Amino acid sequence: MPDPIAERLRLLEDREAIRDLIARYGPLADTGNAEAVAALWSEDGVYAVGGMGEARGRPAIAALISGPVHQSLLADGCAHVLTSPAIDLAGDSAVARCHSVVFRHEDGEWAPVRVAANRWELRRGADGWQVVRRDNALLDGSAAARALLS
């Protein structure tokens, strides 16, 4: 018979580990740490950024951070801010949904340049929780972006 307290503790620990993983993304992206960002994903993970295509695998995900679009954000000053995710757990798999805002420093002011919906698919492996797939879509009124949050 399963121990209900141990089961509840495991759920809490899983939720905290997932929240921590998602929270690490912004600071890592804002420091340009491409390898550490990519390490949040599984080896064959996918990062689908609406309007920018899909990056498959850690090298491609790292290239998003080391590439010219992200490097121009870093040169101006940027902040990737993610809200606390809503998390649905199912054993060693999870889905998390949240909003994200990318701010850019322009002309002495901070301006939001990307406001998006995010859906994270995660899996627990030998090294803990990792992202299997992240879909990010601009909240521009499209049904696709709203679907990521539902």
Image (spheres, rainbow, N blue to C red):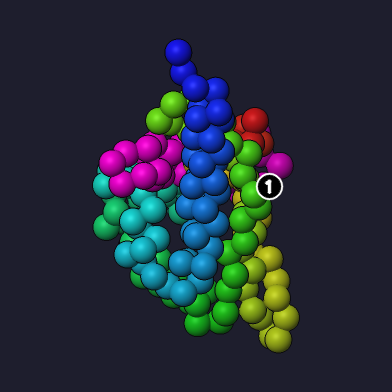
Q: Is 143 left or right of 60, judged from the image as shown?
A: right
Q: What stretch is highlighted in magenta?
A: 121-145
Q: Is residue 26 left or right of residue 101?
A: left
Residue drawn at point x = 49 percent, y = 34 percent: 10
Q: Is residue 82 visible to the viewer in this orientation of the structure?
A: yes
Q: Which residue is drawn at 61% across and 44% down?
A: 85
**Residue 40 vs residue 99, the one in the foreground:** 40
Residue at 50% x, 60% y: name it. Answer: 24
- Classified by dominant secondary structure, the portion drawn in magenta counts as strand
Q: Position of 88 compared to 60: left or right?
A: right
Q: Is residue 11 something one can see in this rendering?
A: no
Task: Judge whether 145 appears above or below 53 on screen.
Answer: above
Circle 1 is placed at which residue position?
140
Dot 1: element: loop
Q: In which quarter of the image is residue 38?
A: bottom left
Residue 143 forms part of the magenta stretch:
yes
For the point 55% across and 23% down, which residue is it?
4
What amino acid does circle 1 point to? Asp
Which quarter of the figure is the N terminus placed in?
top left
